[in-house]
Amino acid sequence: MYKQTIRNITYHFPDLKTLMAKATPRRSGDELAGIAAKSAQERVAAQMALADIPLRTFLTEDLIPYEKDEVTRLIIDSHNAQAFASISHLTVGDFRDYLLLETTDKQILTHLQKGLTPEMVAAVSKIMRIQDLITVASKCEVITKFRTTIGLQGHFSTRLQPNHPTDDFRGIAASMIDGLFYGNGDAVIGINPATDNVPTVIQLLEMLDSVRQKFEIPMQSCVLSHITTTIKAIERNAPVDLVFQSIGGTEATNTSFGINLNILKEGYEAGLSLNRGTIGNNLMYFETGQGSSLSANAHHGIDQQTCETRAYAVARHFNPLLVNTVVGFIGPEYLYDGKQIIRAGLEDHFCGKLMGLPMGVDVCYTNHAEADQDDMDTLLTLLGTAGCNFIMGVPGADDVMLHYQSTSFHDALYIRHLLGKRPAPEFEEWLLKMNIFDEKMRLKSGNVKLIEAMDFGINLI
């Protein structure tokens, strides 16, 4: 039992998961689940009580019983006590203060990563302002490699997302070449297939790989099919670079996705067996999003932000190249408006980075949410200052296959120019060689190589 008194009113919280849910900044998903604070005063009381909780508590009080959830078992069994030792005496409030110290630098934060459980990280985020989330995340550097180096400070990458509602290869190729013209694709060129079957996936993979080889592009490709489909494609010798899967923070959520930790391990090992990376072997690509556990009725009474952060423990176990929170994709039932989406995106980025993950954010919303592109510009700019590893590059910011609003090819140019950030080094070298960018990373146009590339892309199939 936890309690906190404010103005002669004592608020009681029966267990840790209730306390964390009540302490969460307001969002529609927790209200839908009936676990949110009933008032701003109750939320503040919960945050005050949470700040006084020793970090050690999260190692002894499971939000989901150990024997009932394999994600809980993974969190507890993989906890690094040695990495945790230096902060083991702190409360959640003390931990916030420690993270914000100027002397708590990149090296210290890197050392802490494996000593932090997702519940500790989610808890401290709940008592942090937006500027706190940005400040701490900006001190974290998480670098991963396959054919490009992603996450270096001073660099900003994109996933080029050339989706098509019928998987039309010419349409995909046109969007892909267009994105390359704007310097997009250094994180990955990734297609969400409209049809998740092995033959289609293999054809898309072969098309992507033919473009890579034709123009000697230092890039990795991915078709975001279900991991079991990808495993079958690997068995047929398809040119698979990255192995994708959506994941959640509870065993029941992952069951709703048709996966478990053993299936993820099988996909990871299948990807490694191909040995396609040239400068590294980070090859898993995970996507997450606040609300997925609630939408699957698999949240066990845990607030959606804590469920999201638990998914990062799953991701961390498989050394991913990319982790992407698709922050506003599920809809206003879970994140109602621009204010909630902005806060959630910064929370997710902070929590993932603190746990040692190469975090990207799909800065996005659905058309029935109380949000617009101005909100997305705000979140995009804040994430740029926070050191986000990558965002999406979607033609016109409007995904015609998934029917949601994201970020455009131009948005990456905006952040790079505004903040003086550059693409991944290997990809930057290629952009210069192709005469797409100049030495100051300014966009060029009208050269013969671009015209040849467009002709090739459109007529590829």
Image (cartoon, helix red, strand yellow):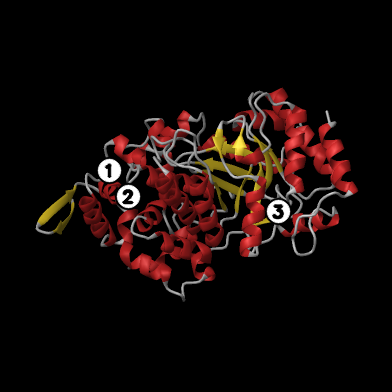
Mark closest to the chain's N terminus, 3 or 2: 2
Q: Are marks 3 and 2 in contact (CB under 8 Å)?
A: no
Q: CA distance from mark 1 to mark 3?
A: 43 Å
Q: Secondary structure at mark 3?
A: loop
Q: Residue at x 32, y 62 (%)?
A: 92
Q: Residue at x 49, y 61 (%)?
A: 137
Q: Residue at x 62, y 50 (%)?
A: 411
Q: CA distance from mark 1 to mark 2?
A: 7 Å
Mark 1 or 3: in front is: 1
Q: Secondary structure at mark 2?
A: loop
Q: CA distance from mark 3 to mark 2?
A: 38 Å
The residue pinned by badge 3 equals 280
Mark closest to the chain's N terminus, 1 or 3: 1
Q: Are marks 1 and 2 in contact (CB under 8 Å)?
A: yes
Q: Out of 449 and 31, give the one closest to the viewer.
A: 449
Mark 3 or 2: in front is: 2
Mark closest to the chain's N terminus, 1 or 2: 2
Residue type at mark 3 is: Gly
- Image coordinates of residue 393 in percent, x first then y, are 64, 44
Which disc is residue 24 wearing?
Answer: 2
The residue pinned by badge 1 equals 36
